[in-house]
Image (cartoon, grey):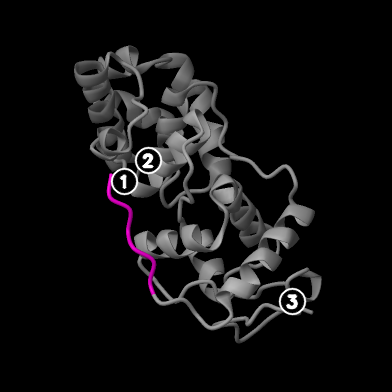
Amino acid sequence: MTRPKPSRLPTGAKKRAPLVLAALQELYPDAACELDFRTPFELLVATVLSAQATDVSVNAATPALFAAYPDAFALAQAEPEDIEPYIRRIGLYRAKAKNLAGLARLLVERHGGEVPNDFDAVVALPGAGRKTANVVLSNAYGYPAIAVDTHVGRLARRLGLSTQTNPDKVEADLEGLFPKDKWVYMHHGLILHGRRVCFARKPNCGACLMAEFCPKVGVTDAQG
């Protein structure tokens, strides 16, 4: 696996980083993955489904899906049209059903039906990418990574930790700013803060522990 190289960081990013970490740990000491899963396979499927969809919608759909297809061997026998009814309420469900059928077959053919603890192997699965691999490997196998979704990317720029819009470059910047043993936590902490306080359109700056040191990059309208 090749990690992207950190870019030129915004002024003050290295001083802000420990303050951001401390604030997140105070606000969300138990931050963790909000997708419901019991096995690496279930986490992989849920993560693929979560692209451009909410965790709530995914968690509502997966119990019935996993009851019907509890592992890669079962899902590999399904056609996309068999999967579609279970995920119809999730965005892009037709494309995702096709990807789930394809990734299950590859898991069976190449990995004995198990999700490999290997970054490049996960990235090679249909519907997966760098973010998916980071989420699955970090939460299922303890692999150190900061998976960059829309929340993480937005907060990284708003907090003055990165100027990048490319998720891979944001990932590299954040991993260069925070201790390796905090990378997985940072992913979850930033997501929770983005969902609960630092909203995309009108962040609740008045209720934010980071208000005093946050440069509020790109903020034109805020609460408080």
Q: Which residue is mark 1?
A: 129
Task: Name the residue rendered at 31%, 15% in the picture.
Answer: 113
Taking depth in this image into account, of 207 and 19 the one nearest to the observer is: 19
| Mark before the other along the chain sequence, 3 or 2 | 2
Q: Is residue 3 magenta?
A: yes
Q: For the residue marked with disc 1, what is the amino acid?
A: Gly
Task: Name the residue rendered at 74%, 62% in the picture.
Answer: 23
Q: Position of residue 209 (x, y in %)?
A: 78, 68
Q: Which mark is residue 133?
A: 2
- CB within 8 Å, label 1 to label 3: no
3D distance between C-alphas at marks 1 and 3: 33 Å
| Mark before the other along the chain sequence, 1 or 3 | 1
Res 89 visible:
no
3D distance between C-alphas at marks 1 and 2: 6 Å
Q: Is residue 17 above or below residue 87?
A: below
Q: Residues within 10 Å of mark 3 (few under 14, many from 20)?
A: few
Q: Is residue 61 left or right of residue 168?
A: right
Q: For the residue marked with disc 3, what is the amino acid?
A: Ala
Q: Position of residue 127 (x, y in %)?
A: 29, 41
Q: For the residue marked with disc 2, what is the amino acid?
A: Ala
Q: Point out the image quarter for the N terminus.
A: top left
Res 87 visible:
yes
Region in magenta? 1-7
Task: Name the residue rendered at 48%, 42% in the picture.
Answer: 144
Q: Is residue 163 above or below residue 152?
A: below
Magenta stretch, overall SS = loop
Q: Secondary structure at mark 3?
A: loop
Q: Which residue is mark 3?
A: 211
